[in-house]
Image (tube, rainbow, N blue to C red):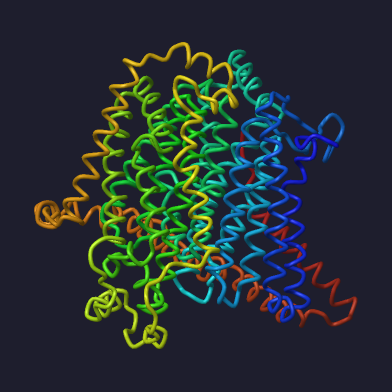
Amino acid sequence: MPQASEIAWLIPIFPLIGAVLSGLGLICLNKKINNSRGIVSISLISFVGISAVISYKSLIEQISGYQPVEKLFVWASAGDFTIPMGFVLDPLGSVMLTLVTTITLLVMIYSHGYMAHDKGYVRFFTYLALFSSSMMGLIISPNLLEIYVFWELVGMCSYLLVGFWYDRDGAANAAQKAFVVNRVGDFGLLLGILGLFWATKSFDFNQIAIGISQSVSENSIPVWAALLLCFLVFLGPMAKSAQFPLHVWLPDAMEGPTPISALIHAATMVAAGIFLVARLQPLYSLFPTIQFIIALVGTITCFLGASIALTQMDLKKGLAYSTVSQLGYMMLAMGCGAPVAGIFHLVTHACFKAMLFLGSGSVIHAMEEVVGHQPVLAQDMRLMGGLRKKMPLTSSTFLIGCIAISGIPPLAGFWSKDEILGNAFISFPAFWFVGFLTAGLTAFYMFRLYFLTFEGDFRGENKELQNELLLASEINSDDEEHNEENGSIHESPWSMTFPLVFLAVPSVIIGFMGLPWDSKFANLLDPEEALIAIESFELKEFLPLAVASVFVASIGITIAYQAYFAKKINLSILFAQRFPSVNKFLSNKWYLDDINEKLFVKGSRKLAKEVLEVDSKVVDGVVNLTGLVTLGSGEGLKYFETGRAQFYALIVFGGVILLVAIFGFQSPQVT
């Protein structure tokens, strides 16, 4: 029996087969396939399950000490020029594959309940399978060129899933926004890949690092050119992983179905950027300037996301900005030269953030029974409250997620986030301080979400507030769907609660894989770094930073408790009314959407109108004038077409006489 690592190329193939079969079925036998929901969902879940089994076996082999496997074949060649393709499976790839297949499998099980009554059920599962296949292919890609192919496939699938409900303006606009913003980053990535190939004649990660190092040392390419190429490649992860200022697409992606929010925000699309930066660490580690830029972007992103999340009332958008903030932490780790810490936080974050998003979907599913099928109402926390008693499993798992992401020991988020802050304290103390403050903000806004949603009294039956929210959203309060309010709050079905309970387990215990004095996770990904970390670990250095991190998180939780549960603090008076400009700044998301709208959307439209004006008046004018001259001259010359040879000879003779007369009047120059 072959090793699982030897057949790792099958991991993305199985979901792809399922997606192709169901897709062809939708095209050829649409009605029959849509009526066979159970068969389609079980088949696609089974295909992803097979990929998950191979991934688990591959991870076990890597943990057991098996050597990484790389299989290549020549995809294209011309003389000495060859382009290899294939797959590679190493510890980093096996960890990512296990994560992606697990989260995808749970999301698909969850979707069976969440999308049960949606007319696009089969289409949704088809997109899910294709999306997961693309991400798995990206992970096992052995070089930058193959990664770029799957990178674009992931982007295409995200466009399809974010805009799944394409008949809604919000979903269609969000899909377009995600597509356009990611094209900006992907264009930079493509230029960077081509530039690195020009400089090194290779797409291989390690060969690129070696080639750039030699070229810079030999002065065959200037340092500024190498820095530019590294930055261009980094633009791709900036967009995919929602880093400032290319983060603006991610919160709007909440317009897609909630299972997609869980998948995109936890383990697939946004993880792709972090994964690529980790793959390129041999290159980025050559240039401290690039590492500083990566760390700076990550620091700004983590604070930006947390600060905007403070004012969000939409449950899913609050979690979305939380994701932006946590991705900033991961990128900060990459900039500090600690890719293991960044990947470790990616893994722990994927577990509790997927659980939080699926939990929010469970809440929204229940709220729709009461307030009608209006996202603006079902997702607004001002209409929630008191759901803990009606939804015990959802509330318990959501609370575990809040504790984990807040960095409270011994849950997973504490170990991974604290490791990042520890590395930042050594490399960039100023960035550590921003990350430290952000940890307090994170704890505050997460427990704000929890208390507003699950504690207190239920506010969903407040008709006046409902109409006010609908009016603010420019939605007709007499909408037919909105009037269908005849249900009550209840716990979600097992297909939706099982993934929540399952993810709660790693959210609690997986952090113990990364204990700073005995990190099994680091030992798997980078044994040398793990050995150095163990030898250099000192409790007296670890404890102050850990205690400070827990202390600032505890302050955030305490303030949230006093403001939204005990009602002893009125933050509206203490903060919003005292600092209205700051509150408005945060409520308007740092005005970044407004700036993009004015500068790029309206600016490009204005430029297009001016170009159209030039085209219609100048270019078209020249073309039309040429046509008129040709037409007029043709009309005039046709009278000279008599067919008489004598007449033609007379014209030639006249022309010669005219030339002689012209040149005859020119007096010779005397030298």
Residue 649: x, y in percent?
A: 86, 71
The residue depicted at 83 percent of the width and 40 percent of the height is: 76
The residue depicted at 46 percent of the width and 65 percent of the height is: 255
Quarter that holds the C terminus: top right
Give left or right: position of 453 versus 213.
left
Give left or right: position of 53 versus 490.
right
Quarter that holds the N terminus: top right
Residue 646: x, y in percent?
A: 88, 76
**Whether residue 155 is situated above or below residue 114 in the rendered picture:** above
**Whether residue 573 is situated above or below residue 370 in the rendered picture:** above
Residue 86, quarter of picture: top right
Residue 253: x, y in percent?
A: 47, 60
Give the camera-side residue of 143 and 629. 143
Residue 458: x, y in percent?
A: 26, 70
Give the camera-side residue of 175 and 216. 175
User: Residue farthest to the top?
Assistant: 535
Give left or right: position of 8 versus 565.
right
Residue 18, quarter of picture: bottom right
Give left or right: position of 305 versus 44.
left
Give the camera-side residue of 67 and 540. 540
Marker count (numbered)? 0
